[in-house]
Image (cartoon, helix red, strand yellow):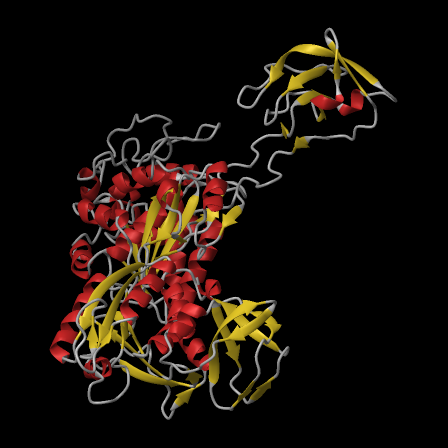
Amino acid sequence: MSQFDTVAMVDWSGGNDTGARPRKDAIWLGVTRDGVDAAPVYIRNRMEAERIVAGLIEQELAEGRRLFVGFDFPFGFPAGFAEGLTGRADPFAVWDWLEERIEDGPRANNRFDLAAEINARFPGTGPFWFNGLKRDIPGLPRKDSREGHGLPERRVAEERTPGAFTCWQLGGAGAVGGQVLTGLPVLNRLRRRFAGEVAVWPFEASDRPVAFVEIWPGLINPAVKRAEAAGGIRDAHQVRLLARAVAGLHPEERDAMLTIDAPEEGWIMGLDHEDKLNRAAGGTLKPPPLRDDCFALPAGVAWTPVDEALALLRDRLQPVVGITRQGLGEARGRVLAEPVVARRANPPQANTAVDGYGFAHASLGEGDQVLPLVEGRAAAGKPFPGVVPEGSAVRVLTGAALPEGVDTVILQEDVRVGEGEIAFRGGLKPRANTRKAGEDVAEGDTILTPGRVLTPADLALCAAVGVAALATYEPLTVAVISTGDELVEAGGKAGEGQIYDANRPMLTALVEEFGYRAVDLGRVPDDRAALRKALDRGAAEADVILTSGGASSGDEDHVSALLNEAGAMAEWRIALKPGRPLALGVWGGTPVFGLPGNPVAAMVCTLVFARPAMALMAGQGWVEPQGFEVPAGFSKAKKPGRREYLRARMRDGRAEVFKSEGSGRISGLSWAEGLVELPDGAAQIELGDPVRYIPFGSFR
């Protein structure tokens, strides 16, 4: 059973606490939950890592999700070691032995002394080597001078892994021995703490809620290199991409990787399947489809108030688009999927805000000033090479890094320049005309948060702090279908009783105005086979399907009928005007919004319901339109029971409404520039009373 809801990857370290600032060669955690990547988590030491992993296990168990936790160090040793150390060919006997003896803290541990103790239990010299301490440790050679210990140099899995280090090497670039001695005791404690819930692969069947799995980031090195080229910390890329890769595998691929017989040495999951992992790591990560019953209304519900309908949509929908990485040149208009962290400060160093002359303010006296000029100057990108002596000044240009010895700049227009000296009036404040390093953005600051639609200004900010690529959601693709025998294409020949299709041009344009991709699937007659074919195509090519017409329960309402046949239909009779019937369902895993056929109602339902829902599915989060309280330029007696949306526009500081409320008056949509929203209850609106006006632009 290899299906997991959450995949976590841990890049381990055997070293000491690495401090508060994220850095390489530390512990990193990557999590992909329900198909969505979380931002990698920097962890400064092993004690903190054990606490965080334990908390993750508790959270996933409490919420009923199956959890895969991968670690990048060996779970076992070469054949013969376990029996030689403990008397039993059982890897868990080694885990117990190490846990009893390891002494580990944030700043120090006894792994080198423990390795020497292990060496003493085997003949000859070894098997462990490398001493990273200043003091000598009897029985632990600093260099590989071992002989006669009788154990294989590598496990079978490592013999088949190019560039793999032996677990006997305790230190040096790429070594894993220290990670094993400090990591296995932590896994053993977690295994005991969550007894019965955790299975350790491949020593135990992975049929429990949590699986601990050995898997190495080196297997996806091509994907990691591509991500690293855009900037960032390699370790963070590794855990993010490896979690994504495991989550993105087809179940049968994952099953094949987990079908391994290695009861003593263990194995590296994904070995000999690197192509599949790299494909899953480098491609677009797709979230799971919506449940077929996600739109089902509670029993007995007939009329749904607008606010309740919106709350239900907000609660039941989720992002349905995949996550990919984009260079800054392609990211405008995309929805950000992960937080963006500044790689360096902006400005990176203190600099001058004007063209002028720089000096140390403390060297100034009272009254007017005359300072000697040093040779040279500081310009943007060309710093002054020396130190400006106290009591002297140097020529500086806008954007130049402040030379050493300079903290204040005077504007060149306020200076008289003589032969090798400058003169200016007194009264200049300290640090005048300068910018502090990081006064805009500090290194490590989160500058953008997920859900943001990226603007040109955002891209400028990212570039300024050294970020060259962003994790973004793929653009939402929306299929648009018009239904009904009465429809003909605009400009074509309309027979008796037929009308031109106004909905499709309107809806496709709205979809593109929202920033999504529109797929025009044309007009479909009142024929279930034809509509089924169109829905199948929409499910294959799009993330969302918008239909208009056929959303009620009449004989020719085939959208509702087909969704009912599929067992994924809910007819929401919403208490609003214009609108009312809204057929919501899932077809082939793709959500369907069945809009009313009347163009006015179709547009209102799209703006009020489909727009925020699609924003959420696009990864942007729930988007509520910005409304404004303005004086009414009309009077109206409103009946209770339904929320009303009137076509409106602003003139002379007041909201005027279209002359007719008839839902067939399409000209009112063109005339209007927004909607006036009237409350659910009864209302008596008089000229000048405050009403809520929502410009069409607020829905975009």
The residue most toward the bottom is: 300
Q: Position of residue 1 (x, y in %)?
A: 21, 66
| Residue 455 visible at all | yes
Q: What is the quadrant of residue 328 in the picture?
A: top left
Q: Position of residue 71 (x, y in %)?
A: 33, 50
Q: Position of residue 317 (x, y in %)?
A: 37, 70
* Horizontal arrangement in the rendering, residue 503 relative to residue 374 (left or right): left
Q: Please, is residue 547 above or below residue 267 in the view?
A: below
Q: What is the quadrant of residue 700 in the picture?
A: bottom left
Q: Residue at x 45, y 48 (%)?
A: 455
| Residue 267 visible at all | no
Q: What is the quadrant of residue 358 in the picture?
A: top right
Please state the total of marks drawn on the protein image. Answer: 0
Q: Residue at x 24, y 34 (%)?
A: 163
Q: Please, is residue 291 above or below residue 470 in the view?
A: below
The residue most toward the left is: 529
Q: Which residue is at the front of the view, 112 or 225?
A: 225
Q: Which residue is at the front of the view, 117 or 433?
A: 433
Q: Which residue is at the front of the view, 404 or 557?
A: 557
Q: Please, is residue 268 above or below residue 198 in the view?
A: above
Q: Which residue is at the front of the view, 128 or 583?
A: 583
Q: Position of residue 202 (x, y in %)?
A: 23, 56
